[in-house]
Image (spheres, rainbow, N blue to C red):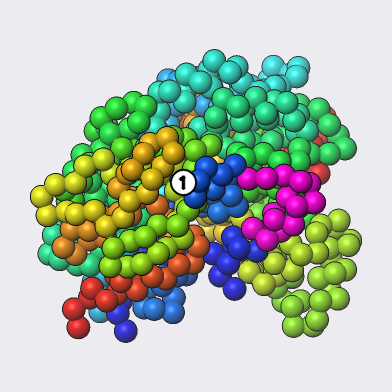
Amino acid sequence: MRFVDSYSFLEKLRSLIYELMELTDKTEGELREASTSVKLGLPSMLKGGVIMDVTNPEQAGVAEDAGAVAVMVLDKLPYDVRKSGGVARSADIKVIEDIMSNITIPVSAKCRIGHYQEARLLEEIGVDLIDESEVLTPVDDKGHINKWSFSVPFVNGARGLPEALRRIGEGSSMIRTKGEAGTGDVSEAVRHMKALTKDIKFLASSLEGGDDVIRKYSRKNAVPYELALLTARLGRLPVVNFAAGGIATPADAALMMWLGADGIFVGSGIFKSNDPQRRAEAIVLATSCWNDPEKVVEAQRMVTEGSALTGLDIRSLRPEEILQVRGE
Amino acid sequence: MVRVGVLALQGDFLEHLEVLQNLAETRLIMGAKDFNADGGIDALVLPGGESTTIGRLLEATALKSELIEKIKEGMPTLATCAGTVLLAKRIKDRVVGETDQQRLGVMDISVIRNGFGRQSNSFECKVELKGIGAVKASFIRAPRIDSVWGSAEPIGYINHPKVGRTIVGAVQSNIIALTFHPEIHGDEKVHRTLISMVRR
């Protein structure tokens, strides 16, 4: 089964849920807005690219010039969220709007897990993608936003296949492996990507033995059976999957692409370094050309280790400082 | 079998490869050396994605001059969305105006990036393309072709409720340029047309 086939399967799932929820599409004449292919299409166009965390229009301009496929607007970079403590919320509307009117690439913004109204605000001002993110302080420890009822696509974090399929089951259009944001330590991103791949391979190899194994997997992990089966048939996640959390160098980005990511999120890694412009360009090059060692070397040469985000060894974090456990 | 090279620097090249899988042999084009590997290629696809990103990478990978040469030599070429932006001689953005972004600049068309608005204005509909037929089309932050001159000519229009009647597809000798994505619907019609343009 091809990745393009997943669009029509998710369209059917959406139709069913829409009918049950009594939701309707926005249509104007022959045009259908916010359809499944339109919502899944946006992340699909970002594949092979880098989405960069920014906090103001200047940084957004640097990101665009460096070749970012989109920017993610935050109030504080994850590294600073860690340092400052307190409650982390969505960025100022004015800042997001300023960025939207200054650059030509898609603008994404973060809302808190479960914060339906922050998400509605972001949808209302017209951001292109919403990240329901564990980097901000969750408002609901029991559940996530029902993303089927939004016309804007969402991206959600996951530490493995079960979380990813639960989010897709809630209507998410894109997944990013969580990693541990704001650390500059890519080890957790590696762990999450490998966990995801391992489960996908397991499901794909279970297909021949009838669907008992897949049923058992979906029950044990509390994921929709239909999505587990679709994943098994596709042999990959049914939506676009980026890697995030701790990516700080071109080599980090190439590593995550090699592990099967469709693209890269870089948070603190760029604008907490001492060479943001060069580093942004280098990470874009390494993400696109990850399979060409010459190009990755060229990218890595563009930056120096002395300028990189110093980083935090994730083993030194206290349990309450770990962000990835938020919102399972 | 016809060999089709798909530019694979960034964007939805996977979808194009999947649509082509039963129609042609495919090659990923990621550097200048890929043009001549395994017997070379007969046709070219420029996928959707972010045109600013792909433009920068064309420069960084030295693919830009190579692509311009192949297209000018007459290699059948299909472009969707960002690919069409890259082909255009003139590029404007709906919000920020004229851009100086990297481009191939080989087609006599002028495009307006994000011509229908942001993602909230993205849509899908049917499009009737002259010489190709009706295709399912998704317009994802799509550009509009606002003028066509010289040897380029329009092959498809839509009537958009806000924008009005607008060109969504154009051809210029060996080039088919679309502002939307038939590939994410798995639609093969356009790709079949591309392959039929390859001289045997």
**Image location of residue A73, percent across then percent down:** 56, 27
**Image location of residue B134, percent across then percent down:** 40, 64
| Label total for image | 1
Q: Which residue was labeled with disc 1? A: B140
- Observer-nearest residue: A56 or A154? A154
Q: Is residue A238 left or right of residue B91?
A: right
Q: Is residue A284 left or right of residue A79?
A: left
Image quadrant assignment for residue A220? bottom right
Give the class, few, some or many, for how many residues have Cα within 10 Å of label 1's Cα (few <14, many ≥20): many
Q: Residue at x 46, y 60 (%)?
A: B136
- Disc 1 sits on a residue from what chain? B
Q: Amino acid at mark 1?
A: Ile
Q: Residue at x 28, y 63 (%)?
A: B130
- Observer-nearest residue: A219 or A32? A32
**Image location of residue A3, percent across then percent down:** 56, 65
Secondary structure mostly taken by the magenta-highlighted segment of the chain: helix
What span is colored magenta in the figure?
Answer: A10-25
Does the stretch in magenta take in A13? yes
Q: Is residue A157 visible?
A: no
Q: Which residue ends up furthest to the front in the rendered image? A: A29
Q: Residue at x 50, y 32 (%)?
A: A107
Q: Residue at x 18, y 51 (%)?
A: B107
Does the stretch in magenta take in B143? no
The N terminus of chain A, quarter of image: bottom right
Could you say whether the residue bearing mark 1 is in a helix, strand or loop? Answer: loop
Q: Is residue A74 visible?
A: yes
The C terminus of chain A, quarter of image: top right
**Image location of residue A180, percent across then percent down:** 68, 39
Image quadrant assignment for residue A84? top right
